[in-house]
Image (cartoon, helix red, strand yellow):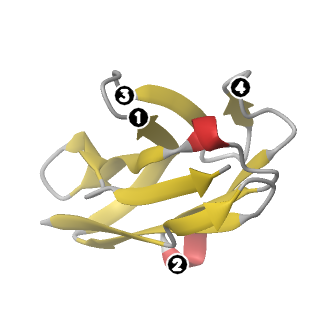
Amino acid sequence: QVQLVESGGGLVQAGGSLRLSCAASGSILSINHMGWYRQAPGKQREFIAHITSGGNTNYADSVKGRFTISRDNAKNTVYLQMNSLKPEDTGVYYCNVLILGILDMREYWGQGTQVTVSS
C-alpha cells in the first residue's frame, strides 16, 4: 500500500510565494517521475510541472520562470516552489507519482491541497 500526503497550500496575496510538498510512503521499491497538476474551479485538471528520476524537469508555459519543481529521493518527496503567484494560479494542486511497488508499477495521486491567490 502506498500513500501520498500533500501539504503547504493556503491563502496568499498576488506576488507572494508558497511551497507545496508531497511525501510518498508505504511499500515503495523505487519512484520514477513525480509531478504536479492543478484544477481550477469549473476547469479540467491541467499539467503544471514534472521531474524525472534523473532530475530533468518540464513546466507548463503558464508557470515557467515562476515555479520550480524539485525532489528529495531520500525522503520520497516532491516539492513545488511557487513564486510571483497570480490569481489565475488559484486551484487545487495534486501531486502525481509513478511508483514501483512490490506488486506493480502504477501512478498515484495526492489528496489535493488548495491554493488561493487573492488580487
Q: Residue 89 in the image: x percent, y percent?
A: 59, 41
The front one of 81 and 102 is: 81
The residue beneath circle 2 is 75
User: Regarding mark 3 in the picture, which secondary structure is present there?
Assistant: loop
Task: Inspect the image, locate mark 3, and give the three-letter code of the amino acid beneath it.
Answer: Arg
Task: Inspect the image, locate mark 1, and give the three-letter code of the amino acid beneath it.
Answer: Ala
Task: Inspect the image, locate mark 4, and give the three-letter code of the amino acid beneath it.
Answer: Ser
The label nearer to you, 4 versus 1, is 1
Question: What crowding class fits label 2: few (fewer than 14 Cα within 10 Å), some (14-19), or many (20 or more)?
Answer: few
- Residue at mark 3 to residue at mark 1: CA–CA distance: 7 Å
The label nearer to you, 2 versus 4, is 4
Q: Residue 106 in the image: x percent, y percent?
A: 24, 40
Question: What crowding class fits label 4: few (fewer than 14 Cα within 10 Å), some (14-19), or many (20 or more)?
Answer: few
Compared with 98, 110 (above or below) is below
User: Regarding mark 1 in the picture, which secondary structure is present there?
Assistant: loop
Q: Residue 50 in the image: x percent, y percent?
A: 59, 38
The residue beneath circle 4 is 62
- Residue at mark 4 to residue at mark 3: CA–CA distance: 14 Å
Task: Inspect the image, locate mark 2, and give the three-letter code of the amino acid beneath it.
Answer: Lys
Between discs 4 and 3, the one toward the N terminus: 3
- Residue at mark 1 to residue at mark 2: CA–CA distance: 29 Å
- Is residue 3 visible to us here? yes
The residue beneath circle 1 is 40
The residue beneath circle 3 is 45
What residue sits 63% from the left and 65% below the top?
A: 12
What residue sits 82% from the left and 51% below the top?
A: 84
Residue 100: mark in rendering: none
- Residue at mark 2 to residue at mark 4: CA–CA distance: 29 Å
Between discs 2 and 3, the one toward the N terminus: 3
